Amino acid sequence: MYQYISPINEMADSPLNTAASVYKALAHSARLRIVAAVRDGELCVCQLTALLGLAPSTVSAHLAELKAVGLLAERREGRWVYYAIAPGDAAAIVTRVLPGLDGDPTVEADAEAVRRLRAIPVAEFCALDAGGRVRAAAPSDGSTAP
């Protein structure tokens, strides 16, 4: 029986595999919207969730995929988690991809929404529910009454 042994290790990290992973991560409209939204600075997860109009778990999964391939960097500050474009090779790819989104109505609407989001302090914004009302805080005595 003949056994083939490859002269290269296709499973090892290589520029080709890295680029394929990055472009695969960008091959979803929600992830492209996230990358476009944070191109001018970091945003908190709650801001991104509101912007996309998706469930927090879905947004977290998209963020995890973008972070795993090195496109996004994460920063924690207290209870808030912020995401921004990661420095390095992945950032260079992002700068080549994003101009292709110029003029897209969704990306333009997102950019306007991000400007409004940045005007509201994160702690204040994240305390609001989807209807713009302050979320009811859990009672400190452990009861379930509002």
Image (spheres, rainbow, N blue to C red):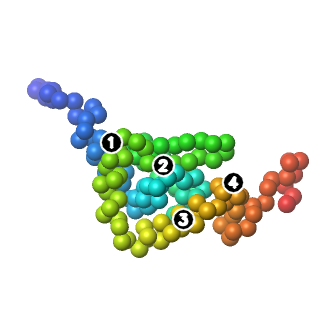
Q: Amino acid at mark 1?
A: Asp
Task: Tell which circle, 2 or 1, labels the residue nearer the N-terminal end.
Answer: 2
SS at circle 1: helix
Residue 53 visible in the snapshot: no
Instruction: Give the label, 2 or 3, closer to the camera.
Output: 3
- Distance in Å between CA atoms under marks 2 and 3: 15 Å
Instruction: Give the label, 3 or 1, closer to the camera.
Output: 3
- With 140 as the anchor, is 71 left or right in this view? left
> How crowded is the residue under tag 1: few (<14 C-alpha within 10 Å), some, or many (20+)?
few
Task: Tell which circle, 3 or 1, labels the residue nearer the N-terminal end.
Answer: 1
Residue at the disc numbered 4 = 123
| Quarter residue 16 falls in | top left
> How crowded is the residue under tag 3: few (<14 C-alpha within 10 Å), some, or many (20+)?
few
> Mark on residue 115?
3
SS at circle 4: helix
- With 90 as the anchor, is 77 left or right in this view? right
Task: Tell which circle, 4 or 2, labels the residue nearer the N-terminal end.
Answer: 2
Out of 62 and 3, give the one closest to the viewer. 62
